[in-house]
Image (cartoon, helix red, strand yellow):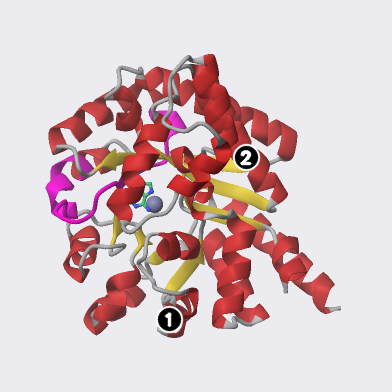
Amino acid sequence: MKDFIKALPKAELHLHIEGSFEPELMFEIAQRNQIAIPYKTIDEVKKAYQFSCLQDFLDIYYAGAGVLIHEQDFYDLAMAYYQKCYENNVIHTEIMFDPQTHTERGIAFETVINGLQKARIDAKEKWGINSLFIMSYLRHLSEESAFETLKQSLPYKDLITAVGLDSSEMGNPPSKFKNVFEVSVKEGYIPVAHAGEEGPTEYIWEAIDVLKVARIDHGNRCLEDENLVQEIVKRDLALTVCPLSNLELRNTDVLTNHPLKKLLDKGIKATVNSDDPAYFGGYMNANFVKVQEALNLSKEEIVTLVRNSFNYSFATDEQKEIYLKKVNEVVNEINS
Ligand code: ADE
Ligand code: ZN
């Protein structure tokens, strides 16, 4: 099964580039930028990565991102992630980045996007990886701040495919960002949002009815409302599920209780993703392997999950066809 998972070409639809910041690279960049971090060793960093909820993690995640200053830093961060994509057979990825995490510290939007864009070009050339960018608004900040970010992004509109909504979910419902999502869509961005990771089903309803998202990030808690489940199926909305993230942030007590299989059984188009792999103990293959073991998923279910990621990606229909052919080739090869 492990070899089967490894051999399949995959797409990742839910990945925060700041969440792929491995401690080794964090130390290196902190040193060259002469920024002090509150850890002496890599072991100390890893020990600090014990979270009891989303906010616990976010505090550490934002502190880590604080050492990123120069275009080269964002380039190195993204290249390290693309290398992991190559190692995990991820051939298409949709990368979220949080501009406000950096602009709030006085780093120019341009610095962030230029570093990411250069890495995207080099990763395509070096490993053949295709990627899209999702600019995520931080929901603990105001809608006005999101509007400011939207404005800053417009000169780089052609480089960005979608807008997202992340950070502290409780107390920051999707409806808080109704206006900025409306304008973002008018500017040509596809809307997605984190909803129902920690937050209640009402937040998922708002994400689909008020923000009119094309995909739901996480969405696990939809299972608490059968009408919502039916609506998600009817509207053909995919969920970007992140098993190891859910485990590490205590949204599931043990992986054997993870809702992934239930979601599939309800007819929901679920996908598997790594969210913040440097913090949650694994990239794409690890997420697939661990959740497969815990839920005893069949090869057919694994292939369904992999196909869902390509089908519900924001790639063109032509590109999707090429990807799905590649998946079929590997499946046929293994079955022959
Ligand atoms: N930002 C980075 N990872 C996140 C997560 N899992 N939920 C909300 N915001 C995030
Ligand atoms: Zn996320």
Residue 97: x %, y % from top left: 41, 37
Is residue 310 covered in magenta?
no
Name the residue located 31 percent from the left edge and 58 percent from the top edge: 53
Q: Nearer the viewer, mark 2 or mark 1?
A: 2
Residue 82, numbered label: 2
- Residue 236 quadrant: bottom left
The earlier-in-sequence mark between 2 and 1 is: 2
Quick one: quadrant of the N terminus?
Answer: bottom right
Q: Name above or below for residue 227 compared with residue 195.
A: below
Q: Which residues are magenta?
A: 157-181
Under mark 2, the amino acid is Tyr
Which residue, given by chain and number where applicable, does mark 1 sit on? 267
Residue 258: x %, y % from top left: 44, 75
Q: Name above or below for residue 89 compared with residue 5.
A: above
The Cα–Cα distance between marks 2 and 1, rounded to whole angstroms, is 31 Å
Name the residue located 70 percent from the left edge and 53 percent from the top edge: 89
User: In the displayed structure, does residue 334 sit left or right of residue 67?
Assistant: right
User: In the displayed structure, does residue 178 sit left or right of residue 335?
Assistant: left
